[in-house]
């Protein structure tokens, strides 16, 4: 029976991994690693906990994931996204049999071409993307480890504020008018699908880099239109906008992902976001 740590287990993807675990690895021991359990930046305590548990897998979801937070506090972003990952990898190497499954992002790319494959070279524009790209290299120093790059994830998190859909819904409910870019493209996916795909990849001993994202390239505006229909009862107010009018930190225009490598290992087809919404009309977002 394998023992698994899930860091960031009260985050979005981490919580869905917990929900789906019994379907894929019912006999495995799943240990949620949350802030209540340990502060991952307390490295002596982390080493002590690792030595006690000696997990076979660490699914590393924890980190500073909001780009705005990373831009305003790059030192904290580096500590949480890079240094914690470095220590976990060192512990895994020392133990010898622990495999790291690391969650990364489409924002490791600069967005100049879109439709990125796992073989394309990262060139991040943001602090968040930069820290994730550095951490990817650390994880991939061991070829048996797995890096999963994903895109915008929808869903309901334990804290109610971790998914892009939760953030949009909160803004709509507050009466804000949302200005959504028509020229910025992502491949959104529901976090439950990300979790299912992750467990299948783990079971199949996937290694290296895998992309897990929705099978549909959508602009921020197109995503907003889909959700406005879903939430018509909230009277959403959305307007088209362009990145040409944006004055903040650099944003990649198109970080759409090719997922063929992972798709060959999965028992199901990764859905596009609009398809997922149609087939899950009652699901919370």
Image (cartoon, rainbow, N blue to C red):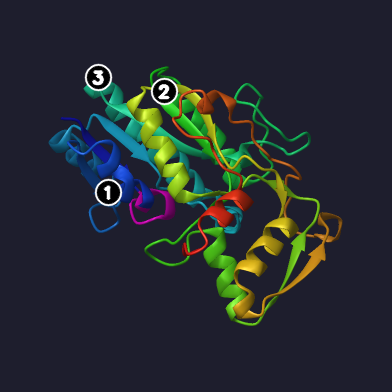
Calculate the distance from the C-alpha at mark 1 to the C-alpha at mark 3: 21 Å
Up-down relation of residue 194 to residue 278 (above or below): above
Mark 1 or mark 3, earlier in chain = 1
Q: Which residue is mark 1?
A: 33
Q: Outermost residue, bottom direction? A: 175
Q: Position of residue 28 (x, y in %)?
A: 19, 36
Of the two numbered discs 3 and 2 on the same chain, state the one appearing first in sequence: 3
Q: Where on the picture, by quarter, is residue 225?
A: bottom right
Q: Is residue 86 left or right of residue 136?
A: left
Residue hosting label 2:
206
Residue at image location 21% in from the left, 36% down from the top: 50
Stretch in magenta: 8-15
Q: Is residue 9 located in the magenta-colored stretch of the structure?
A: yes
Say what secondary structure mark 2 lies in: loop
In the rendering, at what x and y percent does residue 32 appear? 26, 49
Label 3 sits on residue: 96
Quarter of the image where the N terminus is located: top left
The extreme top residue here reads: 143
């Amino acid at each position: 029976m394998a023992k698994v740590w899930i860091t960031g287990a009260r985050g979005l993807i981490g919580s869905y991994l917990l929900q789906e675990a019994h379907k894929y690895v019912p006999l495995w021991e799943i240990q949620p690693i949350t802030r209540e359990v340990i502060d991952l930046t307390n490295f002596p305590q982390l080493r002590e906990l690792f030595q006690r548990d000696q997990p076979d897998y660490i699914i590393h979801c924890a980190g500073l994931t909001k780009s705005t937070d990373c831009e305003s506090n790059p030192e904290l972003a580096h500590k949480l996204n890079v240094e914690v990952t470095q220590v976990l990898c060192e512990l895994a190497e020392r133990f010898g049999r622990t495999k790291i499954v690391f969650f990364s992002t489409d924002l490791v790319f600069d967005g100049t071409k879109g439709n990125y494959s796992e073989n394309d070279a990262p060139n991040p524009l943001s602090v968040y993307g930069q820290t994730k790209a550095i951490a990817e290299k650390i994880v991939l120093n061991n070829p048996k480890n797995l890096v999963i790059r994903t895109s915008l994830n929808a869903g309901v998190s334990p804290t109610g504020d971790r998914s892009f859909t939760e953030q949009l819904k909160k803004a709509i409910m507050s009466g804000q008018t949302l200005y959504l870019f028509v020229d910025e493209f992502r491949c959104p996916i529901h976090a439950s699908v990300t979790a299912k795909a992750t467990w299948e990849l783990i079971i199949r001993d996937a290694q290296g880099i895998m992309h897990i994202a929705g099978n549909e390239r959508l602009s921020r505006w197109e995503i907003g239109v889909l959700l406005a229909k879903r939430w018509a009862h909230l009277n959403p107010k959305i307007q088209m906008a362009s990145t040409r009018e944006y004055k903040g930190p650099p944003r990649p225009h198109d970080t759409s992902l090719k997922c063929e490598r992972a798709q060959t290992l999965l028992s199901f087809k990764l859905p596009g976001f609009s398809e997922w919404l149609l087939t899950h009309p009652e699901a919370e977002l």
